[in-house]
């Protein structure tokens, strides 16, 4: 009988604990998702109905898609999308070509000064971004690469953090696989492509997606190095939309443009969310 009481009390405590935890998580989810809901709601309100609301309403009975039409016809949002796509794809592809061999070298190859060089690489993360931006801006300007895709892309083609993340992931692969491959006459490049990359695929996907998000949301550097609207990205194109497109007062049209810009990243995350979590978990696991 006492065991039944103890078991019942344990179940009660577990139930109360779960209720508290899920209540907190629900509240937190509402807090996080509410700005997105408000952005979407505002984007389907007409300009007149939005301005006539002295007290903001949390719903609308007359939604409209005119704001989305205006987002593509009033300003060259399609051109901003194309520029951002070129910038994102090119930067991410070149970055992978740079960081994967670097991470492999630090994880598997033995050469003099490897640890000192890797420590130096990590110390670069301590440098404030403002100093890097100033140096990059001076270099790109001296090379006459302002208002070019090359000037946009080059400063973003490497990342010490991603090299570190991949290096830690590569280091978890047993050394016996590498030695066995060398006995079979496999080159380092073939071992990297056929063994290490397939094993570390979740981390590679995670790094790729994080870089895509970083490029898509990039604002300071593109705004600094480009003043030609032909090279504007969606992030700094928003400012152009606000100043010379819809105007400061047309908030619904602005929200429609923001929704259109945000959708690709949201869809990307929803598709690869499991891979992202798996890749981050693998990067933090000690082998």
Image: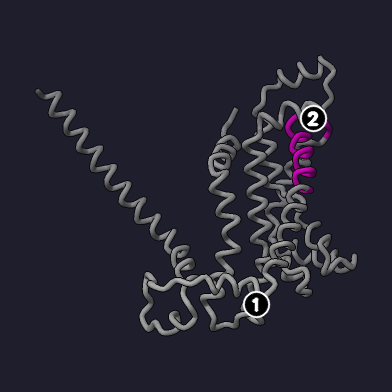
Residue at point 74% right, 38% down?
Answer: 103
* Distance Cα–Cα, label 1 vs label 2: 55 Å
Specify the quadrant of the image occupied by residue 149. bottom right
In this picture, which residue range is highlighted in magenta? 94-112
Quarter of the picture containing the N terminus is: top left
| Number of numbered discs visible in the structure rendering | 2
Q: Where's residue 55, x and y in %?
A: 36, 80
Q: Is residue 245 above or below residue 11?
A: below
Front residue (pair 65, 270): 65
Q: Where's residue 262, x and y in %?
A: 57, 61
Residue at point 59% right, 38% down?
Answer: 279
Front residue (pair 228, 129): 228
Give yes or no for residue 251 being in the magenta stretch. Answer: no
In the rendered view, does 236 fall on the left or right side of 14? right
Q: Where's residue 245, x and y in %?
A: 64, 80
Q: Is residue 159 above or below residue 137?
A: above
- Specify the principal SS of the magenta part: helix
Q: Earlier in the sequence, mark 1 or mark 2?
A: 1
Q: Residues within 10 Å of mark 2 (few under 14, many from 20)?
A: few
Front residue (pair 164, 199): 199
Residue 109 marker: 2
Quarter of the picture containing the C terminus is: top right
Q: Residue furthest right?
A: 143
Q: Is residue 196 above or below residue 28?
A: above
Identify the residue position indicated by label 1 in the image.
74
Q: Residues within 10 Å of mark 1 (few under 14, many from 20)?
A: some
Color scheme of the displayed model: one colour
């Amino acid at each position: 009988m006492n065991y039944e009481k103890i078991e019942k009390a344990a179940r009660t405590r577990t139930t109360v604990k779960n209720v508290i935890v899920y209540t907190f998580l629900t509240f937190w989810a509402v807090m996080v998702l509410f700005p997105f809901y408000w952005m979407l709601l505002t984007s389907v309100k007409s300009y007149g109905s939005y301005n006539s609301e002295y007290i903001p309403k949390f719903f609308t009975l007359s939604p409209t898609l005119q704001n989305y039409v205006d987002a593509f016809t009033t300003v060259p949002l399609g051109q901003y999308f194309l520029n951002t796509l070129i910038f994102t794809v090119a930067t991410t592809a070149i970055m992978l070509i740079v960081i994967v061999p670097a991470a492999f070298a630090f994880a598997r190859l033995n050469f003099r000064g490897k640890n000192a060089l890797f420590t130096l690489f990590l110390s670069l993360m301590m440098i404030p971004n403002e100093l890097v931006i100033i140096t990059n801006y001076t270099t790109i300007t001296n090379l006459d690469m302002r208002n070019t895709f090359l000037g946009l892309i080059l400063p973003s083609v490497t990342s010490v953090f991603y090299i570190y993340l991949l290096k830690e992931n590569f280091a978890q692969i047993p050394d016996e696989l590498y030695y066995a491959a060398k006995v079979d006459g496999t080159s380092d490049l073939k071992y990297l492509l056929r063994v290490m990359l397939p094993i570390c695929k979740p981390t590679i996907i995670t790094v790729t997606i994080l870089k895509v998000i970083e490029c898509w949301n990039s604002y300071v550097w593109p705004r600094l190095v480009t003043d030609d609207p032909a090279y504007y990205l969606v992030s700094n194109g928003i400012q152009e939309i606000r100043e010379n497109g819809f105007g400061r007062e047309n908030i619904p049209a602005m929200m429609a443009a923001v929704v259109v810009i945000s959708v690709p990243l949201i869809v990307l995350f929803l598709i690869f969310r499991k891979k992202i979590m798996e890749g981050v978990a693998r990067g933090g696991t000690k082998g």
